[in-house]
Image (spheres, rainbow, N blue to C red):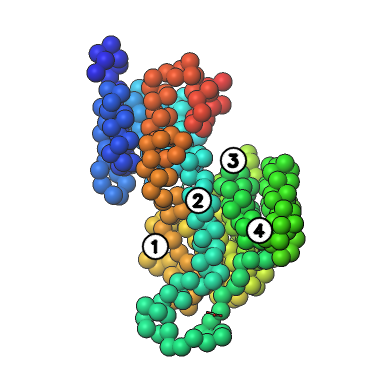
Amino acid sequence: MDNTKQHYRIFATCDIGKEAFEILRAHGYEVEVFDRPEPPPKSLIVEKVRSGVDALITTLRDRIDAEVFAAGNGRLKVVAQYAVGFDNINRADANRHKVPFTNTPDVLTEATAEFALFMLGNVARRMCPAEHLVRDNRWGMWHPYLPFLGREVTGATIGVIGTGRIGKAFLKKAVSLDSDFLCCAGGALDHDFAAKIQETMDVRFKNGFSPDHHTIRYASLEEVLRGSDFVSLHVPLIREGDGRIPTYHLINEKTLRIMRPTAYLINTSRGPVVDERALVAALKAGWIAGAALDVYEQEPLPADSPLRDPELENRVRLFPHFASAGLVTRLSTDPHKGMAGRCVQSVIDVLEGRYGGNPAQMPFVVNKEAFR
Ligand code: GLV
Ligand code: GLV
């Protein structure tokens, strides 16, 4: 260990993999890990920070706000969030205390996008109920349409709401399904990207890979909801008053009523983007056909959630906030491949004063505005 170096302490609110912590320890840092599957109580995070930690590694499960930053009292140098989303971190509080916080974008884009697509296929083709027929020995016979049929995705219209990193990755993969795309970008139109998707579709048609010629276009939210057989959500959670276009309860009674009765809703973004009470009502009343959800208004999903209603079981797929849960995506220590690697790298960037010690220049710092 280099004794001229400052002695830095790191507290991680969960285990992000042994190898990731080894990298930090190899830098001479003292690393303490809350080594239990559940998150630590907020009071413990505050206590640790108050006792003097230089870096905090957090997850979506930890509420990081003024109380935590104040406890940092000038010593806390970085909050490194192990997620791309950071709606658990109060940005204004971080900025007031001049603490940079980081996230892990890009490395989970492909895993999340592929999972959204697989969820879509799963609910559309009724894979879970179909497997249960076999497992429960209720298969009985092969029959043209009994006991049920699924909906083909090929040739359907897929609506993509939110066309940032993950929405775009979803589109790139979904091109292979020879569907039409309607995209709602919330202002951030990327015509160059849409043109490239169109070009890919043109080539597929020209080469005879695709029986029909398909198209992609940007449209209003209403048009996307009205015209799509599948609607996949890829927006961040933005609450009212944040300054940007809010996405809280973007899918609500009004917007669900616009959707087709044969349509499916896919959510891998954030639970509160969907008003769950309205969704359950929509599913029961048949305003939409089904839903596949990976995120919920309250996580873990409460035992008494109406989404668990057995009446909805065949049409509703429920996953445990699992879209980025691929082995490489979660645990690789390569900052270009894994969330662990990217998280650890952002701690190192700040503590070692990389990029001239300027957080505004550091690639994974979210709140750059506080350091300009
Ligand atoms: C997962 O939900 C993430 O934000 O990384
Ligand atoms: C189905 O298995 C078929 O042969 O059509």
**Amino acid on which the number 4 mark rests in the picture:** Gly
Where the N terminus falls, by quadrant?
Answer: top left
Q: Residue 167: in sight, yes or no? A: no
User: Which quadrant of the structure image shows residue 284?
Assistant: bottom right
The circle drawn on residue 112 is 2
In the rendered image, which residue does mark 3 sit on?
A: 242
Residue shown at the point (56%, 26%) measured from the top left: 369
For ligand 2, which image quadrant applies?
Answer: bottom right
Residue shown at the point (42%, 40%) measured from the top left: 338
The circle drawn on residue 2 is none
Q: Position of residue 293 (x, y in %)?
A: 50, 61
Dot 2 crowding, Cα within 10 Å, few <14, some 14–19, many 20+: many
Dots 3 and 1: beta carbons under 8 Å?
no
At mark 4, the secondary structure is: strand
In the rendered image, which residue does mark 1 sit on?
A: 302
Q: Earlier in the sequence, mark 4 or mark 1?
A: 4
Dot 4 crowding, Cα within 10 Å, few <14, some 14–19, many 20+: many
Dot 1 crowding, Cα within 10 Å, few <14, some 14–19, many 20+: few
Residue shown at the point (55%, 58%) measured from the top left: 117
**Amino acid on which the number 3 mark rests in the picture:** Asp
At mark 2, the secondary structure is: helix
Q: Is residue 180 left or right of residue 29?
A: right
Q: Is residue 34 above or below residue 217?
A: above
Q: Is residue 14 left or right of residue 181?
A: left
Q: Earlier in the sequence, mark 1 or mark 2?
A: 2
Dots 4 and 1: beta carbons under 8 Å?
no
Q: Earlier in the sequence, mark 3 or mark 4?
A: 4
Q: Position of residue 80 (x, y in %)?
A: 41, 34
At mark 3, the secondary structure is: loop
In the rendered image, which residue does mark 4 sit on?
A: 159
Q: Earlier in the sequence, mark 3 or mark 2?
A: 2
Q: Is residue 349 above or below residue 253?
A: above
